[in-house]
Image (cartoon, rainbow, N blue to C red):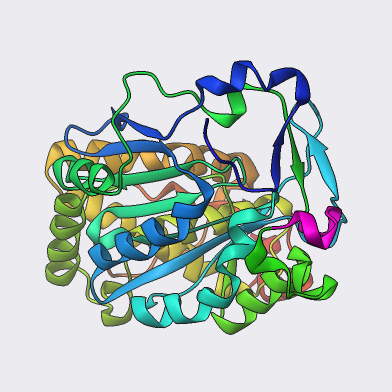
Amino acid sequence: MLELPVGLRRWPSERFAATRQKEGFEISLLEGCDNAYRFTATINADKVATIFRNFSRFFDEEAFFILEHYPEVALPSRPSSTLERPIPLVHYSPYLPTDEILQTIEPYMQRMIHDGFVGFGLANNRKGLELFFSEEKVMTFFTDNHLRLSDFLQRHQVPHCQKLTLPADFGHDHLSLLGFPRESLPAELHGFSDSELDSNIFCEELIDQLDMYQVEEGLSFFLTRKEQEQIAELMEAEVKDEALAEIDFGSLLLDWSDFVNECETGFEGDLWEYRQGLKIRDIIQLVIEVAPSTLADKINSIVKEPDQMFLNTLTDLRKRLDPPSEPQLQQERFWYQGMVRKQGIDLRRDLIRQGWFQR
C-alpha cells in the first residue's frame, strides 16, 4: 500500500480499498502538443525528497521554485468531500541557480512534504520542464523527453502503470502538521516547535528568502523546449526593446493574464503603467505574426481567454489610445481601443490631463 505523508489521512472506511494504491506512474500527451508529456506519479513519502533532489539535476544551471499554500486562515483539517474549499495562493521565485534553491528549501523539505496544505515544485519554461508535488501528494512532471523520465522513475523503483490509483480516488482528510501530537509525526519533524511546524509561518519564510511573487492560476499552458527556442530566436531578431526581448516568453504570457485580471478588479496604476501592460500584448502579437502557423495558432489559443476577458473590461470603444510606432503589426490592436471601466485614481487623473473624457 502507498505510504502517504502524514498530512493526508485516509478515512478508516477506505483502508481496505486503499490497498490498491501502489507506487507507480502513468503517461499522457499534453493536449495540443505532439511531443510534450504529463507524468503523474504516486511515490512513497520517504522517497519524495530523494526523487525531487535527483530530478533537479535535469534543470542544469537554473530554475524557479513554485509554492502553493493556504495563508492566514487556520486549517487544522479538511475532508476531501468538502464542496466549498479555500483557494490556495501560488508563488513563483525568479529564476535562480538550481543549487541555491535546493539549499534554501532543504530545511523545509520534510515539512512541505508532510503538511496536507502545501504543494511545491521546480520549473524551467525555457527547457519545457517542470515537477510539482501537490497538496494531494501526487507528483506531476511535464517534459518533452518521456524516455529519459521513464528511465529515471524506474531507476527509483517507481514502475509504469496503465491505470494509476490516486489518493484522491478515496475519501481522505487534509491535515496540518499542527493537528498531530509530536510523537505521531515522522521522526525528522520531532525537533520542530509549533511555530516551525505552522505552514503559514514556514511558507512565508520561504517566500521571503526566495523573493517569491504571487501569480494567478487562471492561465494554464505548456510550451515545449523546441517551441521556447523558436520563440527566443524570433524575439531576438524582431523585438527592438532589448529589455522585453530578454524576458522569458512564458513570463510575458503570464504578465498579460495578470494585467487583465488587474483590469477586471480595478487598475490601480497610472497611464504609463497601463501602457506597459498593453505593450506586453504588442510583443505577444509580434511573435504570433512572425511565428510558423502551428506555433502561432497555439499562442493564439493561449491568449484567447485573457483577450476576451480584456475586451469585456473595456468601455468608450469609439476612442483609442495611440499605440507606439514599434513594433509594427499587421493585426488591428483591439487592446488600444477604449479604456478599462474600473479606473483607479492615478489612471483617471492621467486620462483627465490628456483630455480623454473630452473627446
Question: Is 30 located above or below residue 103 in the figure?
Answer: above
Residue 76 appears left or right of 215? right
Magenta span: chief secondary structure: helix
Q: Which residue is more in the foreground, 28 or 2?
A: 2
Q: Quadrant of the C terminus?
A: bottom right
Question: Is 126 located above or below residue 145 in the figure?
Answer: below
Residue at 73% across, 53% down: 265
| Residues rendered magenta in the picture | 177-185
Q: Is residue 348 magenta?
A: no
Residue 188, x across and y down, in percent? 63, 68
Residue 353, x across and y down, in percent? 68, 77
Q: Which residue is more in the foreground, 16 or 216?
A: 16
Number of marks in the image? 0
Residue 73: image quadrant is bottom right
Q: Is residue 181 magenta?
A: yes
Residue 35 appears left or right of 212? left
Residue at 59% across, 83% down: 209
Residue 130, x across and y down, in percent? 36, 54
Q: Which residue is more in the foreground, 9 or 132?
A: 9
- Is residue 32 visible in the rendered image? The answer is yes
Q: Which residue is more in the foreground, 262 or 212?
A: 212
- Is residue 331 visible in the rendered image? The answer is no
Question: Is 206 located above or below residue 182 in the figure?
Answer: below
Residue at 56% across, 22% down: 19
Residue 24, x across and y down, in percent? 37, 33
Residue 182: image quadrant is bottom right
Residue 290 appears left or right of 111? left
Question: Is 291 located above or below residue 324 in the figure?
Answer: above
